[in-house]
Image: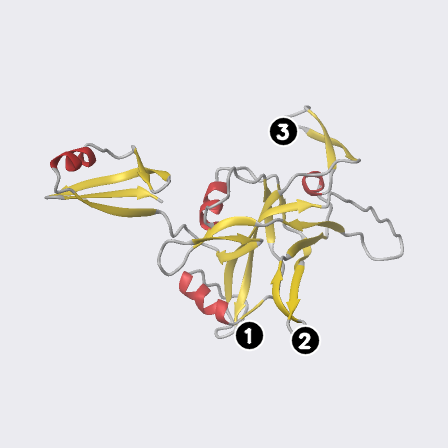
Amino acid sequence: MNYTKLKSTTASFDQMMRRFGVVTVMNAKVYEPIESMEGKTAEEILEALKAKTAICTLDTLKTANVTVDGPDKTISGGQYSNPLIKFGKSARLEIQDALGNAAALDALCGGLVQTSLENKGGVINGLHFGEDFESPKTIVGDSFFIDQKSGQQVPVKIIFFQFLPDSLFNLTQDADGDASVFDMNGDLLTTNIKVPNNEGTGVVHGIFYSILPADSTSVFTEKTIKVFADDEAVKKAYASLVAGEKIQVGEEEKTIKSISKDGTTVTITYEA
C-alpha cells in the first residue's frame, strides 16, 4: 500500500470517510478561542482563527487520543426495567509529546515562562510550575486518514473547539528507563455550533470536536433573498439599500454583499 499519494478534494474526503484508517498522529496549533463560537459553523470558526496567532505548535506528538464516556444519566422502566433514555456524555483529549515545549507547558500544563527582554521577543530564562489552572484553548490539528478503497492519504483537519487543560505536569527523570514524555491532558467542553444539512440551513448542535477536509471553507458564505415589491413604497425602501449596509433577517442583522433590481423584484445577497 502506497502512503505517499495525496488527495485533497472534498470528493476524496467524502469517499475516504465511508471507509478509512488512522495510522499516524496529528500536528497541531493551540489558540485562544475566538469570541462567540456559538451558532457558527466549524468552517467559520477555522476561518476566524486565521486572524489569530497560535500560542504554540505541537509537532512532536507521540499520541493524541480522544475518549468519550457516558451516559451520565439513564432512565429505566417497565416490567424488566429496561433502559428507556440515555443522556449526557463527557469527552477527554489526552496528548503525549516526545519533547518538552515551554510554550505548550505554559498554555496547557499550568507552567509560567520567565523571560527577559534581551532581544526582540524575549529570552526564556526560567520555567515555573505552581497552583495555576489554564483557561480553555482551541486546538486545530492537521493529519491524514487512509482511504480504504484507494489506499491514499487524505488530508484532514481536526478541531477541538474548547479544550480545558488539566493543568498538571509531572517531571520524570530516569537514567535507566525510557526517555521522559510530556503529558498534556484535559476535558473537551461542549460547544454549540451550526452543523450544515441538506436544506442548506443547518442545525445548532452540541459538539466536542469535528473532522473536516483539510481545505474546508464555509458552506454558509452567502445567501440570497428576493423581494417581490409590487407596492412602490416597499420597492423604494429596498431599492435604497446598498452593499455594506445591514439588513434584518429573522432575529439577526446581516451585511449586504450585493443588491440588484429587475422590474418588481429586488434581489439581495447577504453574508450568512
Please say if the residues under marks 1 and 3 sit with CB atoms less than 8 Å apart. no
Name the image quarter holding the C terminus: top left
Please say if the residues under marks 3 and 2 sit with CB atoms less than 8 Å apart. no
Q: Given the image, on which type of amino acid does mark 1 rest? A: Met
Report the side of 132 relative to 93 (left or right): right
Task: Tell me if I can see residue 70 in this picture.
Answer: no
At 72% from the left and 33% from the top, the residue drawn is 113
The spot of residue 245 in percent (x, y) is 29, 32
Instruction: Look at mark 1 in the image and give the residue it sits on.
Output: 1
Colour approach in the figure: secondary structure
> Seen from this angle, which residue lies furthest top?
117
Q: Given the image, on which type of amino acid does mark 3 rest? A: Gly
At 30% from the left and 42% from the top, the residue drawn is 270
Mark number for residue 262? none
Q: Earlier in the sequence, mark 3 or mark 2?
A: 2
Instruction: Look at mark 2 in the image and give the residue it sits on.
Output: 80
Q: Residues within 10 Å of mark 3 (few under 14, many from 20)?
A: few
Mark number for residue 121? 3
> Seen from this angle, which residue lies furthest right?
176
CA distance separating discs 1 and 2 = 51 Å
Q: Residues within 10 Å of mark 1 (few under 14, many from 20)?
A: few
Q: Quadrant of residue 266?
A: top left
Q: Can you say whether 191 is above or below 19 in the image? A: above
Report the side of 195 relative to 86 (left or right): left
> Seen from this angle, which residue lies furthest front?
79
